[in-house]
Image (cartoon, rainbow, N blue to C red):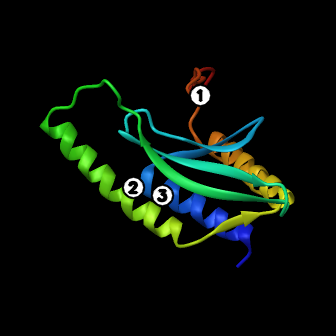
Amino acid sequence: MTELEKLKNAALLIEEMTGCRFKHSSSGAFLYPDADEYLAINMRREADYGAKLYRVRFDANLQTMGRPMDAAGLMRLQQEVGVAHALLSALEIQEYSLTPEEIQDFDDYVRKLEVQREEQEPSDGPVMDQSIGR
């Protein structure tokens, strides 16, 4: 399995387990967390210019600073922590070292996923009534 395939598999696993979505920007692919989640999973790229590689690592952080939680919120946080722990444990088994070309291929892959999602999601715009003129 190539490094690119490993990273693509990791991306799919992250999306499946967390509901987060990979998105694309001018600086490359990144994880977009669900605003309703207490934890955010992050993808970090570390350039190793000597080896001409990017090392990709994953971590998590709380995104609820200052938002009070009741018992139900704490229970939900506990569940999210369990999922994040299992996910990061699985991701950390692998090392992800990609060439600049492979990183670009991954960014292109994420861009294509994003376009496919946009095409599959129903439009929020007005819908023309098909019964008019019948």
Q: Quadrant of the N terminus?
A: bottom right
Q: Nearer the viewer, mark 1 or mark 2?
A: 2
Three-letter residue code for mark 1: Gln
**Spot occupied by residue 36 in the image (x, y as percentages of width and height):** 37, 34
Q: For the residue carrying disc 1, how many other residues have a C-alpha within 10 Å: few (<14), some (14-19), or many (20+)?
A: few
Q: Earlier in the sequence, mark 3 or mark 2?
A: 3
Q: For the residue carrying disc 2, how many other residues have a C-alpha within 10 Å: few (<14), some (14-19), or many (20+)?
A: many
Q: CA distance from mark 1 to mark 2?
A: 46 Å
Q: Is residue 91 left or right of residue 75?
A: right
Which dot marks residue 16? 3
Which dot marks residue 23? none
- Rendered position, 36 above or below 60: above
Name the residue rendered at 51%, 57% in the picture.
Answer: 14
Name the residue rendered at 45%, 48% in the picture.
Answer: 60
**Spot occupied by residue 25 in the image (x, y as percentages of width and height):** 72, 36
Which dot marks residue 84? 2
Comparing 53 with 129, the one in front is: 53
- Element type at marker 3? helix
Name the residue rendered at 43%, 32% in the picture.
Answer: 35
Q: CA distance from mark 1 to mark 3?
A: 36 Å
Q: Quadrant of the C terminus?
A: top right
Q: Earlier in the sequence, mark 1 or mark 2?
A: 2
Three-letter residue code for mark 3: Glu
Which residue is tagged 1? 130
Q: CA distance from mark 3 to mark 2?
A: 12 Å
- Element type at marker 1? loop
Three-letter residue code for mark 2: Ala
